Amino acid sequence: MRRTLTARNHYRYSTSTTPAPPEAALRPLHSPGRLPIPAQVTAHGGLADFNALPQDDAEQALRTCCRSRSWARRIAAHRPYPDLEALLAASDEAAYDLTPVDIAEALTGEDLALPQAAAYAAAITALVAAHSAYQTRFGHPFVICLDDIAPGEALDHLLAGLRTRLGNDPVHERELAAEELRRLARGRLARMTRRETGRETGINSPYVPV
C-alpha cells in the first residue's frame, strides 16, 4: 500500500447559525468567481514519512503547500531532508527561482473558505468587491499569508491587505504575491511535517519564521 500525505484547511469558521454571505464567496472550489485567497493548510505525517514517499506522491503532497509543479518536483527530487530547517531552506530557494509562468500556476490554485457568520456579512461584501477590483487590475488572484494572524482577525487583515495593495503597480504587486506564496509554502511545509516532533498543532500554530 502506498503512503500519502493529505492536507486540509487550517482555518475554519462556524456556519451553524448564519445566513449565506454573497454568492461569489460560496461557490465551489476553483469555480469561476471563487475568491482564491490562500488556505492555511495543515497536513498529517512527518518529515521521515515525507522523505520516504514515492516521487509522485511526494509531489502531490507538496502541491498542497504550493501549486507550482516545478516547485513541487524540485523539492521532492532533493529528498531526503535531515530536518525541517533544511526543507524550509530548499523551499525558499525553489520559491525564489519560480518563473512568471510558475507563479501564475501557483496563484491559480489558491483559495480560502470565508467566514459565514452574520457579523461578517458587511466585511465579506466589501472583500468580494475589493477582490474583484484587484483581479481586474492585476489579472491574478490576491494571496496573503495569515500564519501570524489570529483567526478572529483574519478577515480584517485580508480586507486591509487588499485595499492597500490595490494601489501598487503591477510589477511590484506580482513581486509581493510571489513573496506571499513563499511564506505560505513555509508554513504549510512546517505543518505537514509537524507530527515528527510529537507535538500536536493548534489552530494558529506553529508560527513559522518567514
Image (cartoon, helix red, strand yellow):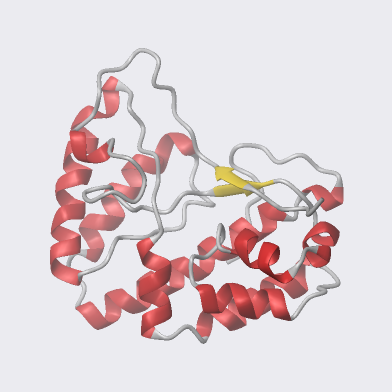
Tell me the quarter of the image containing the C terminus.
bottom right
The quarter holding residue 13 reads top left
Report x, y in % for residue 97. Answer: 51, 87
Q: Is residue 35 above or below residue 167?
A: above
Q: Is residue 133 above or below residue 175?
A: above
Q: Is residue 180 above or below residue 193?
A: below
Q: Residue at x 34, y 41 (%)?
A: 155
The answer to whether any part of residue 199 appears in the image is yes
Report the side of 23 relative to 97 (left or right).
Answer: left
The quarter holding residue 190 reads bottom right
Q: Residue at x 33, y 40 (%)?
A: 28
Closer to the camera in the image, 203 or 75: 75
Q: Residue at x 42, y 86 (%)?
A: 99
Q: Is residue 185 above or below residue 122?
A: below
Q: Residue at x 36, y 45 (%)?
A: 29
Report x, y in % for residue 49. Answer: 82, 57
Q: For the image shown, how many numbered marks are present on the structure?
A: 0
Q: Residue furthest front?
A: 1
Report the side of 105 relative to 56 (left or right).
Answer: left
Closer to the camera in the image, 64 or 13: 64
Q: Residue furthest top?
A: 17
Report x, y in % for residue 90. Answer: 67, 78
Report x, y in % for residue 198. Answer: 86, 44
The answer to whether any part of residue 89 appears in the image is no
